[in-house]
Amino acid sequence: MTEGKRQKQVAAVLEKELNDIFQRLGLAMIDGGMISISAVKITPDLFEARIYLSFFKVNNPADTLKSIQERAWEIKKELTARVRHQLRSMPQLSFYIDDTLEYVDKMEQLFKEIKQEEEKIKKKP
């Protein structure tokens, strides 16, 4: 199902403000790496916001995600203050690890292996 216009608008506002909040709270640089918000998805009823975080060179993404979830109340409090004139009610925030880059790397590696196997087969007499 496709996202509605209002869902996209709310997601864009939340993503912009969350990026600013992460910078201000020092959450963009944690655990020896960088964290960025790769996507914000809003449920059709605008009740839940799913925030997908991309980790770059973070030693332990699961522990880092847990520490961000522990500070979710602080993030939500500041986010609510920033968007109170734009949204009637604040959605629940849920944080997830975005493993898209890992998936892409894995797929590229598999294609490379397939290509190498094909070349070996072609070289055989």
Image: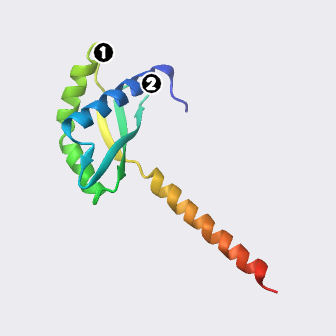
Mark 1 is on which residue type? Arg
Q: Where does the image place residue 117, in percent across and percent down from the top left?
A: 68, 76
- Looking at the image, do the residues carrying marks 1 and 2 touch, with CB atoms under 8 Å apart? no
Q: Kindly give the residue lying farthest to the bottom in the view shown.
A: 125
Residue where numbered disc 2 is placed? 7
Quarter occupied by residue 70: top left
Quarter occupied by residue 52: top left
Image-based side of 9 in relation to 85, left or right: right
Q: Kindly give the residue lying farthest to the right in the view shown.
A: 125
Q: Secondary structure at mark 1?
A: loop
Image-based side of 123 in relation to 97, left or right: right
Image-based side of 25 in relation to 16, left or right: left
Cα–Cα span, label 1 and label 2 = 13 Å
Q: How many marks?
A: 2
- Disc sitting over residue 88 in the figure: 1
Quarter occupied by residue 15: top left
Mark 2 is on which residue type? Gln
